[in-house]
Image (tube, grey):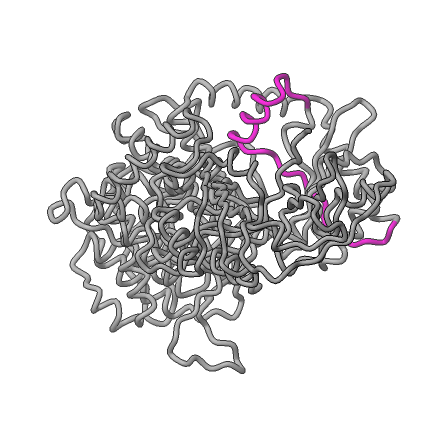
């Protein structure tokens, strides 16, 4: 965590590769002036204050802390500063300033965000174990187990022990610690922000390396934890280092807009104040300038920017209901852009963010975005999990039972912690972490039992299976999405209900094809690990895939050794038909209709056809209604005493190894003799089987169909209804 860089106190000219980034000049909120760290450094050199008063060097931290926590106990801060100052004494930053200025600056960042005292105490001490002789035992003895845990969580692993793996393994350690206490990552983010602010004395190649890690790992983590105040500044600092030309152009756009005589944002803000004043709604209306990266994105999307594109109007109210009151007034009195409305209060973002978003159009065509939220929502929008205080402090009427429960641990963090255990290789972990964090948005899907699964946008049923069942998802055979059968490759949407269909075979195998549809690291790692551990089965799957491709090219063919199903279909569907069906026309030839394949004990009816034969249909067959409407005379028919029958069944299933063998075995156990079989090439992980079978007793047909449905992977079995043949 050592901060080697010099402090850059005042924004200077456009950054170069040597001078480092510049803090954006357009403030996003009302903020206290930045502290003069050189003055603090001189104060730190004077040594600790007397025991009965706070050191002057942390007075700015105390002021910011008291603004959020007026009743906070400041004694831990005083003692933490004394220990940090004395242990870092003599250490200097590359700029020549006392090292203590770094933990002071990090602690100030967190204090301004509203962090509670324990976090600030750990922040003051966050580099002591890493860079001085202070031990974790000392920290625990003087400040307690929570502070010790936070300091340990942000302490880097030594390169002498881990070599090139030190950085990824440090992040792994930090993320695992964050899984138990999100305040670990809060300290890390503030630490990286101060180091990025003071990166100017580093070599250009080191600036670039640190900026890329910040872009790929720290900024996505700040977004997921909802700490927008840190995320946006980190984005701008990274932007300045990695894209200096675009940064310079964006800076020029902002400067030029600031010099304009007219300001459409200010005009709309005044109009909003007037509307709310007349409606008697108490509200604070502010203008929030966009940060550099946001302006850059808007310019790339819209081309030439107008004055309204450089910021948004923010309306702060006291109660949730007031948010909707403000929205109603604005949409009544101003011209709303309906397509821009979003309600993140009723449906908060996965990172705790809540707000109403809308937009109003001016007469000159400019569109101004408006954000509406309560003061508490705004605090959480800026500070995310930092604004929640200590999530582990027991409520007054709910004393702690010794078990840590973290209400701020979101689904994405749980998933990350799960899959990192299965990625022991540091390089694999590092690349997968960056890939996982690159996914911008999270969706929530519902289980039939009312539970939920948090998944990244673009996740499929494969991902849902591994998120819910872990490696037991190898046995998944399909899914229902919103009540309808779906393949495992189906992409899920926010709010979908997903029922995962699991097979009963404990030795079930995942399909190699699932890798094409697995979006989450947990799913990919589990599938890859199984394939690596079972090379023979993996090779068999590869061979089967080639065979299925060949089968598809050869079109539909009957199973080897089986009669041609088309020829079989021309045979009478019952045997012997004359003995099995009695008609009111003795001696007439009888045949069973192929459109509905009736078998005992179906209710049946008959119609005369050419040549004097009688065709027998199920009573509910659609052809019966057509023939009745056409005036065809019905002929009475009934089942005879013979019980043997031949029937064609269609089984629909998901693709899985050994399915055909299991299905035919189940049919044989029910006494069915397979006359012909056709297995169509699979499409979208689904396959259709058609079997013509003979049963010794038609009464066994329901049991046969039930046994076929009970085979893992089969989701439907029905009687075939082929189209009637001409002639």
At x 45%, y 36%, the residue is 682
Q: Is residue 370 magenta?
A: no
x, y percent for residue 275:
84, 44
As drawn, the residue found furthest toward the front would be 587
As drawn, the residue found furthest toward the left would be 160
Q: Name the residue nearer the viewer: 104 or 229.
A: 229
- Judge from the rendering whether residue 55 lies leftward or rightward of residue 628; answer left or right: left
Place residue 493 in its image quadrant. top right
| 147 is higher (above) or lower (below) than 245 | below
Does residue 14 appear anywhere in the picture? yes
Q: What stretch is highlighted in magenta?
A: 279-306
Does residue 38 appear anywhere in the picture? no
| 334 is higher (above) or lower (below) than 644 | above
x, y percent for residue 424:
22, 49
Place residue 312 in its image quadrant. top right
x, y percent for residue 673:
43, 52
């Amino acid at each position: 965590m050592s901060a080697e860089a010099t402090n850059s106190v005042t924004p200077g000219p456009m950054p170069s590769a040597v001078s480092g980034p510049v803090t954006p000049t357009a403030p996003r909120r009302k903020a206290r002036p930045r502290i003069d760290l050189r003055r603090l450094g001189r104060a730190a050199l004077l040594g600790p204050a007397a025991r009965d008063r706070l050191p002057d060097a942390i007075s700015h931290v105390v002021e910011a802390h008291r603004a959020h926590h007026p009743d906070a106990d400041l004694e831990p801060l005083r003692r933490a500063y004394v220990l940090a100052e004395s242990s870092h004494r003599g250490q200097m930053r590359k700029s020549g300033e006392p090292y203590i200025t770094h933990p002071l600056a990090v602690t100030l960042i967190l204090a301004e965000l509203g962090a509670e005292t324990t976090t600030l105490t750990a922040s003051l001490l966050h580099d002591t174990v890493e860079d001085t002789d202070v031990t974790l035992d000392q920290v625990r003895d003087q400040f307690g187990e929570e502070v010790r845990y936070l300091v340990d969580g942000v302490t880097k692993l030594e390169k002498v022990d881990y070599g090139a793996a030190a950085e990824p393994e440090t992040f792994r350690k930090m993320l695992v610690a964050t899984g138990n206490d999100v305040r670990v990552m809060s300290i890390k983010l503030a630490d990286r922000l101060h180091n990025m602010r003071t990166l100017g004395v580093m070599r250009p190649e080191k600036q670039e390396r640190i900026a890329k890690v910040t872009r790929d790992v720290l900024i996505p983590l700040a977004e997921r934890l909802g700490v927008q105040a840190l995320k946006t500044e980190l984005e701008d600092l990274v932007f300045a280092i990695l894209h200096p030309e675009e940064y310079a152009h964006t800076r020029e756009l902002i400067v030029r807009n600031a010099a304009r005589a007219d300001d459409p944002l200010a005009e709309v803000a005044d109009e909003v104040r007037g509307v709310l004043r007349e409606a008697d709604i108490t509200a604070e209306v502010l203008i929030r300038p966009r940060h550099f990266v946001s302006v850059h994105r808007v310019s790339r999307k819209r081309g030439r920017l107008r004055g309204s594109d450089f910021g948004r109007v923010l309306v702060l109210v006291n109660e949730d209901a007031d948010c909707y009151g403000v929205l109603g007034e604005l949409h009544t009195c101003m011209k709303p852009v309906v397509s821009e409305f979003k309600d993140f209060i009723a449906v908060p973002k996965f990172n705790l963010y809540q707000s109403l978003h809308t937009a109003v159009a001016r007469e000159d065509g400019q569109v101004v975005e408006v954000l509406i939220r309560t003061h508490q929502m705004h605090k959480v929008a800026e500070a995310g999990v930092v604004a929640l205080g200590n999530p582990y402090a027991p409520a007054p009427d709910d004393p702690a039972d010794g078990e840590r429960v973290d209400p701020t641990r979101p689904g994405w963090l749980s998933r990350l912690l799960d899959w990192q255990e299965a990625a022991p290789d540091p390089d694999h972990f590092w690349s997968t972490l960056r890939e996982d964090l690159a996914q911008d948005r999270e969706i929530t899907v519902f289980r039939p039992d009312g539970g939920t699964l948090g998944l990244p946008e673009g996740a499929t049923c494969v991902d849902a299976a591994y998120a819910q069942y872990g490696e037991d998802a190898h046995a998944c055979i399909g899914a229902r999405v919103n009540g309808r059968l779906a393949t495992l490759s189906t992409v899920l949407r926010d709010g979908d209900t997903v029922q995962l269909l699991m097979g009963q075979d404990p030795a079930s195998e995942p399909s190699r094809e699932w890798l094409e549809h697995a979006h989450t690291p947990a799913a990919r790692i589990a599938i890859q690990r199984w394939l690596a551990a079972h090379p023979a089965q993996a090779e068999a799957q590869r061979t089967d895939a080639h065979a299925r491709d060949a089968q598809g090219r050869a079109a539909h063919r009957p199973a080897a050794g089986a009669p041609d199903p088309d020829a079989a279909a021309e045979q009478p569907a019952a045997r012997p038909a004359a003995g099995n069906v009695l008609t009111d026309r003795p001696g007439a030839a009888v045949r069973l209709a192929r459109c509905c394949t009736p078998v005992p004990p179906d209710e049946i009816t008959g119609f005369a056809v050419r040549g004097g034969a009688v065709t027998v249909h199920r009573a509910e067959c659609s052809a019966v209604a057509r023939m009745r409407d056409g005036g065809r005379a019905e002929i009475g028919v009934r089942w005879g005493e013979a019980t043997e029958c031949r029937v064609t069944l269609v089984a629909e299933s998901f693709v899985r190894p050994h399915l055909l063998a299991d299905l035919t075995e189940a049919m044989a156990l029910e006494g069915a003799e397979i006359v012909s079989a056709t297995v169509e090439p699979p499409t979208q992980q689904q396959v259709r089987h058609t079997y013509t079978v003979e049963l010794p007793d038609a009464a066994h047909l329901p049991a046969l169909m039930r046994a076929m449905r009970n085979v893992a992977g089969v989701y439907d079995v029905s009687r075939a209804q082929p189209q009637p043949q001409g002639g």
